[in-house]
Image: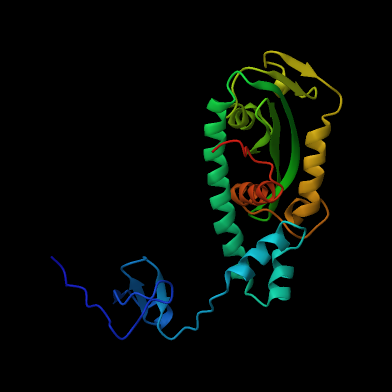
């Protein structure tokens, strides 16, 4: 059956304050503990810094307005790893909320879609000392209830575009450039310039250091690209707000 865990009343979890703490190994020779309430690991002799909600929100605003993580770390005097964790954690929450809103909006706007304007932009994905191009497909959905944006990230192919298409109803007119991925769409109009999307792409390159074409900042995962865009869309209110 194994040994019964011994709870340490002399120790409290730095995350939730619980005393339901047990020993959990010695990585690098230092005793590690596990909180049975929140599931967090911690070291008893480590110094944990708790930053206020205002500092976290300020860091996120700075990130979505053109500052790099390293610059935010220097200005706010916060560890770089902490800034990265905030952006990843809150960006993931915003992205998951966006996906939920897209699914709900798809049912609400059925029969009310006027135009779906789609275009794509490229960015770098850096992995294993090699640089790869990845593409962001963006779609402005104009409906009688309101305007919102859907996006997907991946290769410049039909599979990545289908991630966008799956979140919108079939009604309404498609508008795009002459890229061949869009040719199979029904009720499709080709134009030379896709103005609203180009404006969004320019804004993303201006607001997110990782999207600038001449920069040391790189994307190391597709998820971080998705989460970063989600933070910008929420800040600019480019979400389906008509969904209750």
Q: Is residue 102 left or right of residue 37?
A: right
Colour scheme: rainbow
| Residue 56 percent location from the top left of the image | 61, 67
Q: Is residue 244 left or right of residue 142?
A: left
207 over 7 or under it: above or below: above
Residue 197 found in image quarter: top right
Quarter of the figure with the C terminus = top right
How many numbered markers are drawn? 0
| Residue 22 percent location from the top left of the image | 29, 75
Between 183 and 58, the residue placed more toward the observer is 58
Residue 120 found in image quarter: top right
Q: Is residue 182 left or right of residue 91?
A: right
Q: Is residue 23 left or right of residue 46?
A: left
Between 219 and 174, the residue placed more toward the observer is 174
For this orientation, the residue located farthest to the left is: 1
| Residue 110 percent location from the top left of the image | 58, 21
For this orientation, the residue located farthest to the right is: 192
Q: Report whether residue 155 is seen.
A: no
58 over 228 or under it: above or below: below
- For image coordinates 69% across by 42% down, the residue present is 238
| Residue 210 percent location from the top left of the image | 73, 54
Quarter of the figure with the N terminus = bottom left
- For image coordinates 80% across by 58% down, the residue present is 215
Q: Report whether residue 116 is seen.
A: yes
């Amino acid at each position: 059956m194994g040994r019964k865990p011994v709870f340490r009343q002399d120790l409290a979890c730095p995350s939730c304050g619980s005393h339901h703490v047990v020993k959990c190994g010695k990585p690098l020779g230092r005793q590690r503990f596990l909180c049975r309430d929140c599931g967090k690991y911690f070291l008893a002799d480590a110094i944990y810094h708790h930053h206020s909600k205002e500092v976290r929100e300020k860091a996120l605003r700075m990130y979505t307005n053109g500052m790099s993580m390293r610059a935010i770390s220097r200005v706010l005097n916060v560890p770089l790893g902490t800034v990265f964790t905030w952006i990843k954690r809150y960006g993931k929450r915003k992205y998951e909320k966006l996906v939920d809103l897209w699914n709900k909006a798809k049912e609400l706007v059925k029969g009310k879609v006027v135009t779906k304007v789609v275009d794509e932009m490229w960015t770098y994905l850096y992995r294993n000392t090699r640089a790869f191009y990845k593409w962001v497909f963006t779609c402005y959905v104009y409906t009688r209830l309101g305007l919102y944006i859907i996006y997907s990230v991946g290769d410049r192919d039909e599979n990545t575009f289908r991630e966008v298409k799956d979140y919108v109803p079939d009604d309404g007119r498609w508008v795009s450039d002459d890229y061949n991925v869009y040719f199979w769409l029904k009720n499709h109009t080709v134009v030379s310039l896709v103005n609203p999307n180009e404006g969004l792409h320019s804004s993303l390159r201006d607001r997110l250091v990782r999207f600038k074409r001449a920069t040391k900042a790189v994307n190391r995962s597709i998820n971080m690209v998705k989460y970063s865009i989600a933070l910008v869309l929420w800040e600019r209110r480019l979400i389906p707000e008509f969904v209750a």
